[in-house]
Amino acid sequence: MKRNKKERQQKLREKIDADPFSTDEALAQSFQVSVQTIRLDRMELSIPELRERIKHVAREHLDEVQALPLEEVIGEIVDLRLDEEAISILDIGAEHVFSRTGIARGHYLFAQANSLAVAIINDELALTTKASVHFSRQVKNGERVIARAVVTESKGHKSWVEVTSKVNQELVFHGEFVMYRSHR
C-alpha cells in the first residue's frame, strides 16, 4: 500500500533508525517507490547516505580490535564491543564470486564470520579451535552481507562465539566458533 509523502518519510526515518545499514535500494523496494524517491526523502530529512551512517555507527560503538590488525579483518567492522558483540559488512564484488555463476565463494562468507569471531575476543591472541557452519542460501554479486557475532560463553581459555550473516534481513550463513584465548 502506497503512503503519502509525510507518512512515508516518517516510516523511512523509523526504518533507518532501526537498521542504519539499510541500502537505498532495499528501502525503495520496501516502500514500493524508486531509489531516487528514497534519496530525495533522505535529503529532505537530513539523513546521510549509507556510508556516512556506517561511519557514524562505527565511531560510536567501536572498541579497538586486540587479536589481529584491523586490515586483516574480512569486511568492514562497524560495531565492536569486545567479548560481547560485533558487526561487519562485506559488499560482494566480482572478486568474491565464481565468474561463471556470479555466486559468492563460500570461503569469503566463512572468512568474514571467522575474522569477526577473532576480532571480538578481548585478547592479544585469539585462535579458532573449532567451527560449525551452515550456509542457508547463495549470495550473489552486488549483495551486502551483514555479519553479527555474539560471545555466548567464556570459560578459562575458551570463548564460544555465534555468528549470523544476513542479506536484506535474510539468513545466509550461521556459524558457531570455539575460540582459544591466551588470557582469561
Image (cartoon, rainbow, N blue to C red):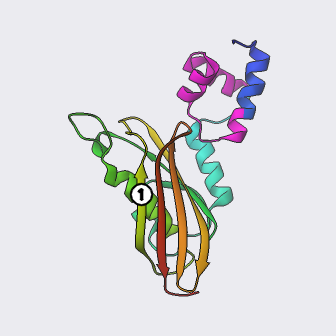
Eyeballing the image, is 168 above or below 54? above
Q: Position of residue 151 (x, y in %)?
A: 59, 67
Where does label 1 land, which residue?
133
Q: Is residue 38 magenta?
A: yes
Q: Crowdedness of circle 1 by 10 Å Cα count: few (<14), some, many (20+)?
A: some
The residue positioned 69% from the left and 12% from the top of the image is: 2
Q: Position of residue 150 (x, y in %)?
A: 59, 62
Q: What range is drawn magenta here?
A: 15-44
Residue 82 appears in view? no
- Examine the residues drawn in magenta and state their main secondary structure: helix
Q: Quadrant of residue 26?
A: top right
Q: Residue furthest left?
A: 100
Q: Quadrant of the N terminus?
A: top right
Q: Which image quadrant for residue 80?
A: bottom right
Up-down: is 141 above or below 165? Answer: above
Residue 160 falls in image quadrant: bottom right
